Each structure stands twice: as structure tokens, then as C-alpha cells.
Image: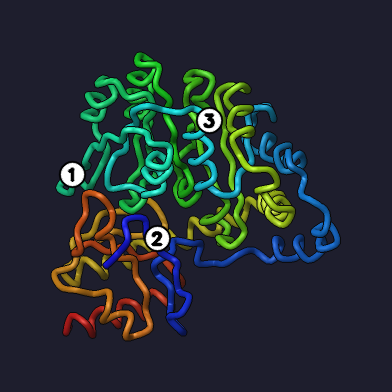
Amino acid sequence: MMERFEHGGDTYGLGDVIDFSASLNPLGMPLQIARALKLATSSFSPYPDPQCRDLVKALAAYEGVEADRIVATAGSTDAFARIVTALAPEKALVCSPCYSGYEQALRQARTRVVHHTLVASEDFDLSERVIDYIESGVDMVFLCSPNNPTGRVIPRDLLCKVLDAASRQSAWVVLDECYLDFTNEATAVSLLDRYPRLIVVKSFTKSFAMAGIRVGWCVCGLPGTAKALREAGMPWIVSTPSQVAGIAALGIPEYLDTSREYIQQERDRLQSALADMGMTVVPSHANFILFQSPQPLYEPLLERGILIRRCGNFRGLDGTWFRVAVRTAQENEKLVSALKEVLGR
């Protein structure tokens, strides 16, 4: 039985498997990052810079904002914990299905969590119905674009309507953009001056395939918000290797361009193959695909050396739903072949 906050990527103890359960860039961590880490090993003995000065400076230049509005974090999970700790919401809105880390952070802070359930027949798209929940008195809203596990993006006009509603209620909006690099959508950072209670959360984990190196960041509307988030984190939590890797990643934007093109091509092929096998496929904008199967898949595929993400512990989904990452062409073909074998096709 799955635990409520179980995630993908736990291949430890499973032997030699192809991991489709963790949605990481299939092109792997760039060599430039590995080289930067190797060259910096002499700096790993002292304590890390607790203010992440060089990384924050690089992130500020990348985002086009002042450095005092940037908070470096040990990945997005650390960011969500900081946000909830620093801003202490009493009643928060989560749109389900979504990443369970939001609710986990809120539960640990004993925040009352309200759920708005997205509709399968609408591809789990966010709609204006969410505004009714905001107007019911929440003081923090968690959104994700593209959403995990659905892969759906929030259109800019709808996002602004949601932000307008939140502004009327003086509610914070936390926007998770950790998968945005896999799309052609623009970041919401440009909206921060208009909506100072918006916090945009990002991470290097997925886009640069370095989940083992915990590093991400928040972009805040106001310097005071960023200061509160920095103070809510534990000292030295962003390690020196993490800071080095983040700076190196920002120096290779062409890697993301190549990745987007490759992933979009493979995602389209994989979605078509899943649909041809009778799966109910949610069209994705990200590097993963959510689908519903007419029969059990997890154990049969694991027996064939393929690990997929069971989605029964996502609120709003049941055991018939699964998520697979878009991996290399060869690996995706192995998944399709294994699925055909399991389904008897």
C-alpha cells in the first residue's frame, strides 16, 4: 500500500530498472555541471556560504530582478516549507491532483487545507471555479504550472484572474514552476511587480537532471518576503556543491533549448502510443504523461525491469492512474513494448 506522501524516484533496492517514475530530463546532467563540481572540490571543506551570494547574484541576473528578491533553497520542497513557516497561513487552498509536498508542508504547520478537485473530463485543467474557493477566505493558494501529475499549464489570462481574486482577499499565491523549462510558456516572474503577494518557486532538479543535488530558488514580489523566507530556512542547508552546480547550470541555456525539442518530440510519440493501446491520456505540456489504464500495470512492468509512478496516492486519483516520465527514444520504446506485452497486444 502506498503512503500518502510517497514519491517517485525510489529505485533503491529494486535492482536494475529503468526509472519512469521520476520526471527528470532524459538527456541527463550536463557535463559542464560535472566539470564545475570537479574543479570546485577544494571548496567543499569549509561551511557553505549561508547567504549563497554568488548563486543569488547569478539567479537575479537570470530572472532580471533585484538580488534581494531571490531566495536560494535546497530544492522546491525546502522552498514550500520555508514559505509556510515564514508566512504562517491559517487556511490554504490546494488544487488536486497535485504535488503532495504542498499539503505535507501545510499539515506540518497545522494549517487548515481546503481542496479544489480538478475534473478528469476537463483534462484536470484549472478553471475559474477556483475563484469561489479563494473568495471563501483562504490566505494562501498553491498552484503549479505545468501541474504535477497532469502536465497541464495555466493560461496567463486565467492566472491573472486568480491573482486578482487572491489580491482582493490579501491572499498569498505560491506558483510552482519547477517543470516550466520543458514548455514554451513564459515565467510568471514578470507579474511580481503587479502582484507582490505572488511567490514563484523554481528548481534545477528536473530540468538539469540533478535530483541528487538539492538546489532551487524563489522569486518574491517584495524584498521583505524574501528576507522572511531566508530566515525561515536552516543554516547552510544549500550546500557548496549545490551552489556550484546551480551557477554552472545557469551558464548553459542552450541545453534547455535542446531538451525542450527532444522531449516534445518523444512526448508526442509516447502519448500516441499510449492512446493506441487504449489508455486514457491527459495531453501533457511537461516531460511526463498521466494516463489511466484498463488493467493493473505497476507490478507487471516492474517484473519486466520498468518502474512507473503509481498515482493512487494523489488526491483526486485512484489506482487506475499512472504517470510516466518521457525518457530517451530507446527507453520509451522499451516501455511501449513492455506495455504491449502486459496488455496482450
SS for callout 1: loop
Amino acid type assigned to the residue bearing label 1 in the image: Val
**Residue 18 sits in quarter:** bottom left
From the viewer's perspective, tell me whether residue 295 is left or right of residue 88: left
Asked whether residue 269 appears in the rendered view, the answer is no
Answer with mark 3 or mark 1, whichever residue precedes in sequence.
3
Give me the residue at 39% from left, 46% from top: 104
Question: What kind of element bears circle 2?
Answer: loop
Q: Secondary structure at mark 3?
A: helix
| Mark 3 crowdedness (10 Å alpha carbons): few <14, some 14-19, many ≥20 | some
Q: Residues within 10 Å of mark 2 (few under 14, many from 20)?
A: some
Residue wearing tag 3: 86
Residue farthest to the right?
42
Q: Which residue is mark 2?
A: 7
Which amino acid does the dot numbered 3 rest on?
Answer: Ala
Q: Which mark is residue 119?
A: 1
Q: Mark 2: which amino acid?
A: His
Q: Nearer the viewer, residue 190 or 129?
A: 129
The dot on residue 255 is none
